[in-house]
Image: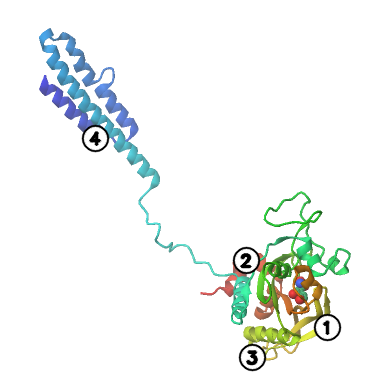
Amino acid sequence: MEDTLKQLVEQARTSIAATATQAEYEAAKARIVGPNGSFTELRKQIGTLPKEQRPVFGKLVNEAKQAIEAVLDEGRERLRRAEIEARIGPAIDPTLPLPELPQGTFHLLTQIRTELCSIMRKVGFTIAEGPEVDTEWFCFDALNTPSDHPARDLQDTYYLNAKTSCGNILQRADERYLLRTHTSTVQIREMLKTPPPIRIVSPGRCYRRDTADATHSASFCQMECLAVDKGISVKDLKAILDYIFQSLLGKEAKTRFRPHFFPYTEPSFEVDFYCGHLKRLGKDWVEIGGCGMVDPAVFDAVGYDSELYSGYAFGFGIERIAMILHGVDDIRYFYQNDLRFLRQFAQV
Ligand code: DAH
């Protein structure tokens, strides 16, 4: 009897070990401990034994039962693990590079922005960032452009719904949020944060209610610059613009100012540059941005002493620079993500 039990346990071990699926396991299990299973049948024989043999047989049956349960548990665990492994697939090393994916490169606008920032860092400017959603005060009022000022109409913009809440951007009573129309907002934000002297550049995205065509887009990028210190004059403004365009285009590049009006600078100019040595640009002066000496009203708005300090500011479009430098004749190419266009400027 003892041998029969041992044999049965061995058979159970072999048949459970041979199962490869849940269904096979269940069938094998039923053949052992199911209602008509081999072990079940053997246990029933306990009733047919003489009374004195029953305790010994019962003990052996119990031991065999425990051994079979262990075999079943082990089999179930083996299959469960196999199932998980099959689902996960082969082991991978997540630290390996993905050879099948091509490496991306920076968009042309990002390249130009990075280059401009590094040109400005070399002469002591730091990079400042401001929010694209801003308030009317930062975009207009603080920049000496009150609500009845005609210059405000020129930048009639995208206003956010009056109920919109932008928790991290403080709003005055009855003031609306808008998508900023220029990066000049960052001048105000930085001056409120930092006492003079200050030298910052701020590249970023702006929004205007423009109909898209070859030279207009409702969303575009600008770079703003602000320097405030004692004794800053138009000479410094001219020098920094010459420095930027000579760094970008070569020592032969020149800039010139034409009188203009911006509410936040006095005097104000439009800046043109000239690059006769570059064939593509030819002999024409190309308009590139606006600039001027910070208007005392702007200093008043941020609490700077306009008797003690003076400063210059300028802003220009990053797309425009990219278009001029690379002969791109339609601003919309920058946003269409057509790889045939983008790949021409890929840095490898
Ligand atoms: N904010 C102007 C625009 O978007 C550009 C500009 C003009 C920026 C004069 C300035 C400035 O900082 O002084 O057209």
- Asked whether residue 217 appears in the rendered view, the answer is yes
Secondary element at image label 4 = helix
Q: Which residue is mark 2?
A: 338
Q: Which residue is mark 3?
A: 251
Q: Would you say 204 lies left or right of 102 here?
A: right
Q: Which residue is mark 4?
A: 17
Q: Earlier in the sequence, mark 3 or mark 2?
A: 3
Q: Would you say 264 lies left or right of 118 here?
A: right
- Asked whether residue 140 appears in the rendered view, the answer is no
User: Marks 4 and 2, how far apart in space?
Assistant: 58 Å
User: Marks 3 and 1, how far apart in space?
Assistant: 25 Å
Mark seen at residue 259: 1
Which amino acid, mark 4?
Answer: Ala
Q: How crowded is the residue under tag 4: few (<14 C-alpha within 10 Å), some, or many (20+)?
A: some
Marks 1 and 2: CB-CB under 8 Å? no
Q: Earlier in the sequence, mark 1 or mark 4?
A: 4
**Rendering coords of residue 124 (x, y %):** 61, 80
User: Marks 1 and 2, how far apart in space?
Assistant: 39 Å
Which amino acid, mark 2?
Answer: Asp
Under 8 Å from ligand 1: the CB of mark 1? no
